[in-house]
Image (cartoon, rainbow, N blue to C red):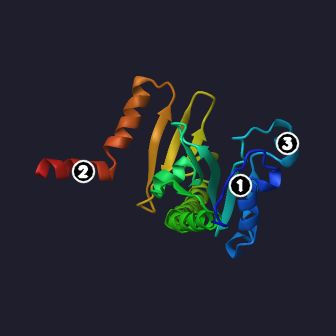
Amino acid sequence: MKDQAMHKINSTWEELPTIILAEKIKKEKWAVSTTIDLSTDKAAWELNSAPWCDPKITLTVPYKTETMTIYVIWMSVNSKGTVVDKFKIETPTYDRTSANIRTKTSKTFRGAISKIEDTIIALIPSKDEAIKRMEEAKRWKRKMDSKREELKEQLNDVRLAEYYDNSVQYKASASYNMIITLDEKHESLYRISNLNGQFTIDEIRQILKIVGTNPRAVAERLLKQSQ
């Protein structure tokens, strides 16, 4: 078969299956913006070549704001030592897990290209989901940034420092600080998630009084008593 891939004994660089395949991929329309990397170059391969040492192809395929990584490896023998002479097309572990992509194999150049195309198509849903998550994260961060600035304006006599994406820190001194976390569900509420420092009994009583007489705390206690 003319399209059959084969690693001949004493092959030159240009005769290696993965080198031939890489050249064929370059001619595909979908590969116009694809980066094609080899695990070694011609000079290094000729210096250290061995009958089983075919360069590995790494394809980086751009997709919207994401990229897809696909590996193509030439297998002369399998783990049992049986001659198989075929291409193995696979993706990084995280993509195989998230998109349930299985390793594909082919003994022909056209078949390998077809399996690569199948892998690209199979990866699209997971990449779309990743793009969606990224856009949602950006929207969430913009919302938190806006709410943080609003809090700073309302407490303009207090110096607040950014702590995490959804919180600020009031640092009274090196040993005394308080973390205020922005409430994502309630626009006008803020959560004190951490209070650090050393306090006297009287100071603790004042803190407890503020917490205990909070209208929402009172309402929560009354609701519990009525159930």
Residue tagged 3: 46
Residue 21: quadrant of the picture:
bottom right
Q: Tell me: 205 left or right of 3.
A: left
Q: Nearer the viewer, residue 109 or 31?
A: 109
Residue tagged 1: 18
Q: Nearer the viewer, residue 181 or 83?
A: 83
Q: What amino acid is found at the position of numbered circle 1 in the picture?
A: Thr
Residue 182 can be seen in this image = no
Of labels 1 and 2, the one closer to you: 1
Q: Nearer the viewer, residue 41 or 205?
A: 41
Between the residue at mark 1 and the residue at mark 3, the CA separation in whole angstroms equals: 15 Å
Q: Are marks 1 and 3 in contact (CB under 8 Å)?
A: no
Q: What amino acid is found at the position of numbered circle 2 in the picture?
A: Glu
Of labels 3 and 2, the one closer to you: 3
Residue 31 can be seen in this image = yes
Residue tagged 2: 220
Name the residue: 45% across, 61% down. Answer: 188
Which mark is first along the chain, 2 or 3? 3
Q: Tell me: 183 left or right of 36.
A: left
Q: Going by the picture, which residue comes out furthest to the right? A: 43
Q: What amino acid is found at the position of numbered circle 3 in the picture?
A: Glu
Residue 136 coordinates in the image, percent (x, y): 52, 64
Q: Which secondary structure, mark 1? A: helix
Q: Residue 77, relative to residue 145: is it above or below? A: above
Name the residue: 55% across, 37% down. Answer: 81
Q: Residues within 10 Å of mark 1 (few under 14, many from 20)?
A: many
Between the residue at mark 1 and the residue at mark 2, the CA separation in whole angstroms equals: 68 Å
Residue 218 coordinates in the image, percent (x, y): 26, 49
Q: Which secondary structure, mark 2? A: helix
Which mark is first along the chain, 3 or 1? 1
Q: Residues within 10 Å of mark 2 (few under 14, many from 20)?
A: few
Which mark is first along the chain, 2 or 1? 1
